[in-house]
Amino acid sequence: MAKILIVDDEQMIRTVIKEYAEFEGHECFEAEDGMQAVKMVRDGQYDLVIMDVMMPKLDGYYAVKEIRKFSSIPIMMLSARVEEYDRLFGFEVGVDDYVTKPFSPKEVMARVNAILKRTQPEKNATIVSDGLEIDIAGRNVYVDGEKINMTPKEYELLFYLAQNKGIAISRDKLLSNVWGYDFYGDDRTVDTHVKMLRSSLGPYRDKIVTLRGLGYKIEL
């Protein structure tokens, strides 16, 4: 069971998502604008946020930007905007998935469960290599004992590579397993996030090895 915050200015949409989520055993909370959502995430403990884009007071994009200043909670964006630019912008500001309206509630829940499966790993799982420590359960990463801040996608990328340490993983496979089976991205998406991840890892950036013409692997 997960605690899910549903953010949308349309009551009907919040109700539909809530009904499906509660049917699967999740506990749901509601917010009707971005400003309220930011406050609730700051003050509460949630496992996932489902966020609309077009809302009064503070729209979804700005709400995500504010939340990312203090939390790495997974966020799914809902939007009537279907252009590739809008989807890419959503990922740039820190969302984990992007669903266009009108949507199927069953598809939304399938995506929700996929995100939760990726972001709620086994308890007490920690990977340590030299001065790099990956606290999987707590979704924290430490470099030489100092906690570092990363985007959710950086963490998921590192987590996936670490679970498959020493194994060559193609860019296509990374896109499929980290971004989702129907993400409309390309190799540049992976390369950009690997570059960001290496920057975050600092002195341990070389643990992520580029396999020219194929993809990446991590040596731990």
Image (cartoon, rainbow, N blue to C red):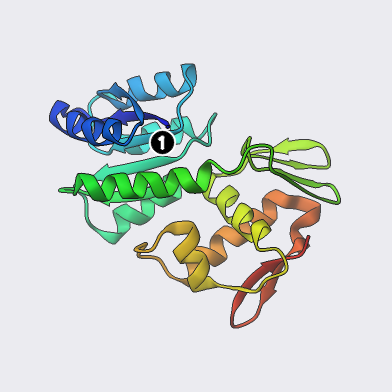
Q: Is residue 145 above or below residue 173?
A: above
Find residue 189 and report its horizontal and vertical position in percent.
Answer: 48, 64
Q: Is residue 154 above or below residue 194?
A: above
Decide which of 178, 195 is in the foreground and name it. 178
Q: Is residue 51 above or below residue 202?
A: above
- Residue placed under numbered mark 1 in the picture: 64
Q: Is residue 61 above or below residue 28?
A: below
Decide which of 44, 56 is in the foreground and name it. 44
Q: Is residue 154 visible?
A: yes
What residue lies at 28% left-to-right and 46% top-to-bottom?
Answer: 108
Going by the picture, which residue comes out furthest to the right?
130
Find residue 64 and report its horizontal and vertical position in percent.
Answer: 41, 36
For label 1, count other residues whose C-alpha is less than 10 Å away and answer few (under 14), some (14-19) or many (20+): many
Which quarter of the rendered picture does the C terminus lie within?
bottom right
Say which element carries label 1.
helix
Q: Is residue 94 visible?
A: no
Q: Quarter-wise, where is residue 27 in the image?
A: top left
Residue flagged by tag 1: what amino acid is it?
Answer: Val
What residue lies at 21% left-to-right and 50% top-to-bottom?
Answer: 81
Q: Is residue 151 left or right of residue 1?
A: right
Q: Quarter-wise, where is residue 23 in the image?
A: top left
- Tally of numbered tags: 1
Decide which of 161, 22 is in the foreground and name it. 22
Which quarter of the rendered picture does the N terminus lie within?
top left
What residue lies at 45% left-to-right and 30% top-to-bottom?
Answer: 66
What residue lies at 32% left-to-right and 43% top-to-bottom?
Answer: 77
Find residue 2 and report its horizontal and vertical position in percent.
Answer: 42, 32
Find residue 106 and report its horizontal and vertical position in percent.
Answer: 23, 47
